[in-house]
Image (tube, rainbow, N blue to C red):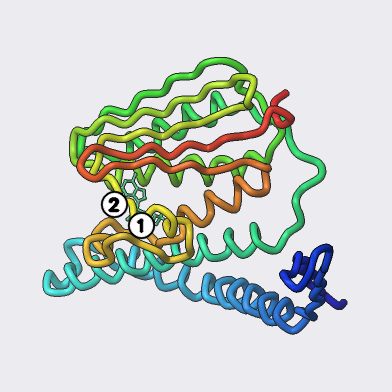
Amino acid sequence: DINIQLQYAITRYGPGDRLMVVRDVTRLHNLEQMRKDFVANVSHELRTPLTVVVGYLETMLDLDDDLNPRWKRPLQQMQQQASRMQALLNDLLLLARLETSDNPSEDELVDVRPLLEHIRKDAEALSGERGHHISLHIDGNTRLHGIEGELRSAFSNLAFNAVKYTADGGEITLRWHSDAQGQHLSVIDNGEGIAPQHLMRLTERFYRVDTSRNSTTGGTGLGLAIVKHVLLRHQGKLEIKSEVGKGSNFSCHFPPERSV
Ligand code: ADP
């Protein structure tokens, strides 16, 4: 396969002059493909040994009374970090799959109502004793052509982020509505917000606003990259509005052709 990139420009040499640049980007494409395959393969290979490690750690922690108390804390920390690694590998694999597989021609018919109800409950469970108020408002058509698993990943990433980056007891709203422009999901929080200089880069892989603080929230830095790719595959768009100290609004827009 040969990949070429065409650039067409109107030059300033004279009226009516045209310049066409044909560039061979085959090597670049192949390198990019190799990078994606490598990440996918490594993530896949690391998953099995890690499952074994996590399994044994859980068994040891279950020993409880038989466990030397000095070992309890280190084992708990090992288990926590190993679980983080599992989450990271799962996200890397999902992202690799989203980047490499073709856009699906045969989509499923998805009703987002039960999906969003589940996500609201899961977000509440994640919040736990932190006591966020999480509400769901649905208005209009909730059925669209899409891939349910991918939509679930995208929406739950946004809802879980809202919990992670909003102080205890904060307000989080999931709002679905449909109109002539299409179908829209907004995830709104009154949390810490994001400074304008970060907004453009948030969907980059591993981009995090405050890396020191974020190590305690346990994210992977891949969540919004996943959201962006899922939306791209659904011909949708992600819109982010945020103000430091006031909160954020992450909106997913789906074109009207998607609705059923
Ligand atoms: P992470 O795993 O770090 O949450 P994401 O890709 O999901 O990775 O998000 C990237 C960064 O965007 C986060 O580290 C955080 O700094 C910021 N962010 C995401 N969602 C919110 C939100 N609702 N409020 C404030 N900051 C957010």
Q: Secondary structure at mark 1?
A: helix
Tag of residue 30? none
Residue, disc 2: 195
Residue lying at the far bottom of the rendered structure: 27
Q: Residue at x 22, y 33 (%)?
A: 170
Disc 1 residue: CB within 8 Å of ligand 1: yes
Whether 135 is drawn above or below 80: the answer is: above
Residue lying at the far left of the rendered structure: 70
Classify the position of the C terminus by image quarter.
top right
Residue lying at the far top of the rendered structure: 140
Whether 253 is drawn above or below 24: the answer is: above
Q: Left or right of 251: which side holds 235? A: right
How far across and down, in percent of the image, does residue 178 sit? 58, 21
Question: In terms of image quadrants, where is residue 143?
Answer: top right
How far across and down, in percent of the image, does residue 110 sit? 66, 30
Whether 59 is drawn above or below 157: the answer is: below
How far across and down, in percent of the image, does residue 152 sit? 55, 41
Q: Residue at x 40, y 39 (%)?
A: 159
Residue in the foreground of this view, choosing between 212 and 253: 253
Whether 246 is drawn above or below 173: the answer is: below
Q: Secondary structure at mark 2?
A: loop
Q: Residue at x 19, y 33 (%)?
A: 169
Question: In terms of image quadrants, where is residue 240?
Answer: top left
Dot 2 crowding, Cα within 10 Å, few <14, some 14–19, many 20+: few
Instruction: Check disc 1 and give the amino acid type.
Output: His
Question: In terms of image quadrants, where is residue 65?
Answer: bottom left
Residue, disc 1: 198
Residue in the foreground of this view, choosing between 194 and 152: 194
Contact, mark 2 vs mark 1 (Cβ under 8 Å): yes
Q: Left or right of 134: which side holds 144? A: right
